[in-house]
């Protein structure tokens, strides 16, 4: 069977909703965390810092840098 592009998109949408419906809150949170970490690992340091500043602010960047470098 070969699906058309719209049929494949619908299948993907339906499957994603099916998977999400089967998750409890802890699993959903872990999935979100894992997805974010996987995506952020693709960023350069400059890209990551830029995104944090764009979404939050410079103070957030400084706070996160401080906690990351306080060893």
Image: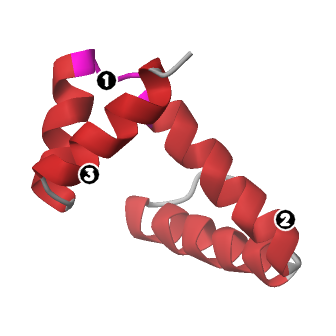
User: Which of the two labelled residues, at mark 1 and mark 2, occupies the earlier sequence position?
Assistant: 2
Residue topped by disc 1: 43
Q: In the rendered image, which quarter contains the C terminus?
A: top right
Residue topped by disc 2: 27
Residue topped by disc 3: 60
In this view, the residue in front, 37 or 17, is 37
Residue 52 among magenta residues:
no
Residues packed near mark 3 inside 10 Å, few (<14), some (14 to 19) or many (20 plus): some
Asked where in the image residue 48 lies, by quadrant, the reply is top left
User: Which of the two labelled residues, at mark 2 and mark 3, occupies the earlier sequence position?
Assistant: 2
Q: Horizontal and vertical percent for residue 60? A: 26, 51
Residue 31 versus residue 22 in the image, above or below: above
Name the secondary structure under disc 1.
loop
Give the residue at x 39% y 22%.
42
Give the residue at x 26% y 18%.
45
Q: Horizontal and vertical percent for residue 2? A: 59, 51
The span shown in magenta is: 40-45
Q: Horizontal and vertical percent for residue 23? A: 86, 75
User: Which of the two labelled residues, at mark 3 and mark 1, occupies the earlier sequence position?
Assistant: 1
């Amino acid at each position: 069977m070969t699906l058309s592009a719209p049929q494949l998109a619908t299948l993907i949408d339906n499957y994603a909703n099916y998977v999400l419906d089967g998750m409890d809150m802890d699993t959903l949170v872990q999935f979100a965390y894992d997805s974010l970490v996987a995506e952020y690992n693709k960023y350069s340091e400059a890209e990551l810092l830029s995104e944090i500043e764009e979404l939050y602010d410079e103070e957030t960047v400084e706070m996160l840098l401080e906690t990351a470098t306080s060893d």
